[in-house]
Image: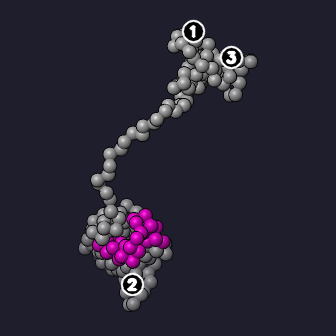
């Protein structure tokens, strides 16, 4: 259940206690909203009295008042100084209804102490590409042919060829000339070898 306003919370408390007897035409928007919430969630709402104060619970979790939510998050953050928004939200969800990580993060982003504890650096060094002293072998997969190929009475749809780009070898056979005939033979042998493994 989402956090409710103070007026809605007080009206819900009175409705759960069965002491709310205000006429419908005199009810405010918050009280009408409370009546709808009470009708929908009446089986899960309960009240516990602590220190002479009535506290509303929804599904055994304390219902949060919207105006008090930020203060509750700040108090929890001071208690667990090194924790972030996710761990705070997880801990608060166990006991409170209507708390989410997004709401906790919104409150913590406005807090000065959280910013000092969890600093974000903006002066990062520019990314530099790694330069190698020698050429590494890189394997590239090319989609050579889209049509069907038959091999040993089996039909294959896609034929992938492994090409070693830098050393110019295909299927462990060196290509000494960059001409179509040499590539054609290498590609065909590579396709046959791969089709056996498919």
Contact between marks 3 and 2 (CB within 8 A): the answer is no
Q: Describe the element under mark 2 as helix, strand or loop.
A: strand
Q: Separation of disc 1 and disc 2 at Cα?
A: 88 Å
**In the rendered structure, does residue 87 fall within the stretch colored magenta?**
yes
Q: Residue drawn at (41%, 87%), measured in percent from left and top? A: 50
Contact between marks 1 and 2 (CB within 8 A): the answer is no
Q: Is residue 104 above or below residue 144?
A: below
18 or 53, nearer to the observer: 53
Q: Which residue is mark 2?
A: 54
Q: Which residue is mark 1?
A: 181
Q: Describe the element under mark 1 as helix, strand or loop.
A: helix
- Name the side, left or right, on which 190 lies relative to 67: right
Q: Which residue is mark 3?
A: 150
Using the image, tell me which numbered label, if any, was put on residue 68. Answer: none
Report the mark closest to the observer, 1 or 2.
1
**In the rendered structure, does residue 166 fall within the stretch colored magenta?**
no
Q: Separation of disc 1 and disc 3 at Cα?
A: 22 Å
Q: Residue furthest right?
A: 152
First to last magenta residue range: 66-94
Q: Earlier in the sequence, mark 3 or mark 2?
A: 2
Q: Earlier in the sequence, mark 1 or mark 3?
A: 3
What secondary structure prevails in the magenta region? helix
Coordinates of residue 192 in the picture (x, y in percent): 67, 19
Coordinates of residue 171 in the picture (x, y in percent): 63, 23
Answer whether residue 116 is visible to the viewer in this image: yes
| Visual colour scheme | one colour
């Amino acid at each position: 259940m989402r956090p409710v306003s103070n007026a809605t919370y007080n009206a819900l408390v009175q409705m759960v206690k069965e002491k709310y007897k205000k006429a419908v035409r005199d009810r405010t928007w918050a009280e009408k909203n409370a009546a709808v919430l009470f009708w929908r969630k009446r089986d899960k709402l309960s009240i516990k009295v602590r220190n002479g104060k009535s506290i509303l619970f929804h599904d055994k979790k304390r219902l949060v008042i919207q105006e008090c939510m930020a203060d509750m998050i700040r108090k929890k953050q001071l208690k667990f100084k090194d924790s972030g928004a996710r761990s705070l939200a997880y801990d608060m969800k166990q006991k409170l209804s209507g708390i989410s990580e997004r709401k906790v993060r919104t409150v913590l982003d406005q807090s000065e102490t959280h910013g000092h504890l969890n600093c974000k650096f903006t002066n990062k060094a520019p990314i530099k590409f790694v330069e190698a002293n020698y050429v590494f072998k890189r394997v590239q997969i090319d989609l050579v042919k889209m049509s069907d190929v038959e091999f040993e009475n089996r039909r294959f749809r896609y034929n992938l060829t492994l090409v070693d780009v830098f050393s110019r070898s295909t299927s462990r056979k060196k290509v000494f000339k960059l001409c179509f005939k040499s590539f054609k033979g290498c590609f065909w042998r590579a396709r046959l070898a791969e089709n056996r493994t498919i």
